Image (cartoon, rainbow, N blue to C red):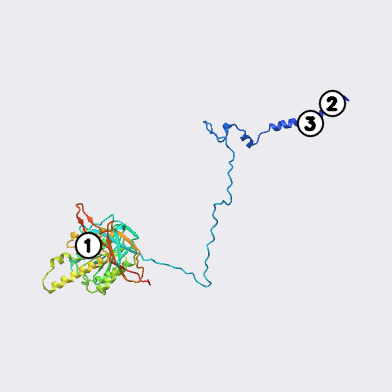
């Protein structure tokens, strides 16, 4: 009996001890990462500074970021779809193009005495008028760029002194050329002759001048000079080239057998776009020595050359160029230097005319220089003496025809 009771207690006691052992083992198991971090000492919390020796901080766990709402309140609604236009059935696509006329005027401002270019002017210093109506200058810049120029030279049997003057003038101008300039040379007597087409190699122009110089003492083919026809041909050649172009016309100015009349030539010059003519009269020394000789023949000759010089000057004035009448070859370097500076150093004015009609009419242009107060501009030298100046600009242009 006593033995039986003892056997009954042993299993119960063993079960209780087993449960206690399991509880003890669970209490000694490793804690979770979150629980472990929450129980770290304050010195190892992530908001504390790392020890001076460096090393990783206590925060090695992930960072939870708040999730952005899918549709925040401040998000604008999507834009509506663009309407699609469909042509009516059987209708072709149509396009509309509007052309606004634009006029570009090259203006040179030169001191009258020294012929020096006046720098430092501003857009507000210029007033431009078309047919008496002031225009708004919308584009302005100082230009000094490579040039495209045609040397149009008279080489006829008028007298060797005329030919020598022409060759000296052409040679002096060629020395002013720069590597990026385009230049061509054409001579004329009864007919025109192309010495060199447009090139950037000024050696070709010099070679052409030398070839003409080799025969300068020989009789030329014709005495007649058709300057009107030659100038018209030169304008045609340059009209196919974009941008600003120049003609340096070196001739006596006398015309004998041109098909075109002076009036037709002047109309052609007026209608030219972006072409400026600079003219140099030849034979100045010979004419000065023989001027005023008696007799009807002498008087008629003087009138012929006087008219010729006026024609040359008119060609230049109408296109905003300059005219020179050198008497001695020593004047040529200064003359061609002035031409070169005037060609390269200019103010470019751009405006859209208030008269936008494309009717082919001639529009007269006038450029005025004013100071900051709107009064006529005045220049002074170092001694406060007034300096006169010239404004070099073409006197007008011909509007495009609507059918062009």
Q: Is residue 242 above or below residue 20?
A: below
How far is mark 1 from mark 3, CA to CA?
132 Å
Residue marked by disc 1: 169
Query: Residue 6 — which label?
Result: 2
Residue 394 position within the rendered picture, expressed as x and y whole percent measured from the top left: 28, 65
Near mark 1 (Cα within 10 A), the count class, few <14, some 14-19 or many ≥20, is: many
Looking at this view, name the residue that lies furthest to the left.
Answer: 294
Near mark 3 (Cα within 10 A), the count class, few <14, some 14-19 or many ≥20, is: few
Query: Residue 15 — which label?
Result: 3
| Frontmost residue, 378 versus 84 | 378
Query: Residue 322 — which label?
Result: none
| Frontmost residue, 164 versus 276 | 276
Residue 263 in sight from this viewpoint? yes
Residue 3 position within the rendered picture, expressed as x and y whole percent measured from the top left: 87, 25
Residue 144 in sight from this viewpoint? no
Side of 135 relative to 224 (left or right): right
How far is mark 1 from mark 2, CA to CA?
147 Å
Residue 135 position within the rendered picture, expressed as x and y whole percent measured from the top left: 32, 63
How far is mark 3 from mark 2, CA to CA?
15 Å
Image quadrant holding the N terminus, namely top right
């Amino acid at each position: 009996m006593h033995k039986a009771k003892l056997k009954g207690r042993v299993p119960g006691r063993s079960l209780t001890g087993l449960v206690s052992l399991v509880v003890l083992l669970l209490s000694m198991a490793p804690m979770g990462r979150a629980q472990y971090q929450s129980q770290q000492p304050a010195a190892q919390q992530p908001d504390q500074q790392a020890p001076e020796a460096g090393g990783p901080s206590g925060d090695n766990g992930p960072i939870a970021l708040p999730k952005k709402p899918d549709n925040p309140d401040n998000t604008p609604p999507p834009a509506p779809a663009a309407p699609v236009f469909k042509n009516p059935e059987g209708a072709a696509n149509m396009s509309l193009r509007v052309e606004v006329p634009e006029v570009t005027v090259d203006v040179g401002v030169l001191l009258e005495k020294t012929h020096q270019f006046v720098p430092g002017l501003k857009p507000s210093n210029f007033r431009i008028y078309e047919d008496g109506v002031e225009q708004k200058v919308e584009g302005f810049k100082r230009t000094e760029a490579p040039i495209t120029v045609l040397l149009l030279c008279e080489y006829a049997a008028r007298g060797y002194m005329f030919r020598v003057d022409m060759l000296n003038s052409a040679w002096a101008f060629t020395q002013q050329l720069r590597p990026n300039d385009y230049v061509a040379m054409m001579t004329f007597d009864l007919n025109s002759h192309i010495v060199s087409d447009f090139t950037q190699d000024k050696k070709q122009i010099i070679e052409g001048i030398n070839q003409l110089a080799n025969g300068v003492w020989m009789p030329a083919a014709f005495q007649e000079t058709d300057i009107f026809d030659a100038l018209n041909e030169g304008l045609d050649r340059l009209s196919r080239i974009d941008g600003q172009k120049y003609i340096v016309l070196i001739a006596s100015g006398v015309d004998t057998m041109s098909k075109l009349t002076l009036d037709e030539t002047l109309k052609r010059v007026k209608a030219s776009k972006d072409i400026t003519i600079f003219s140099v009269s030849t034979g100045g020394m010979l004419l000065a020595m023989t001027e005023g000789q008696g007799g009807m023949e002498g008087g008629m000759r003087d009138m012929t050359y006087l008219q010729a010089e006026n024609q040359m000057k008119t060609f230049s004035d109408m296109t905003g160029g300059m005219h020179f009448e050198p008497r001695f070859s020593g004047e040529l370097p200064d003359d061609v230097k002035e031409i070169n500076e005037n060609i390269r150093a200019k103010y470019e004015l751009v405006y859209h005319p208030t008269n936008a009609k494309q009717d082919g009419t001639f529009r007269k242009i006038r450029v005025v220089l004013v100071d900051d107060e709107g009064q006529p501009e005045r220049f002074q030298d170092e001694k406060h003496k007034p300096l006169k100046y010239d404004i070099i600009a073409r006197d007008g242009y011909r509007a495009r025809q609507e059918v062009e």
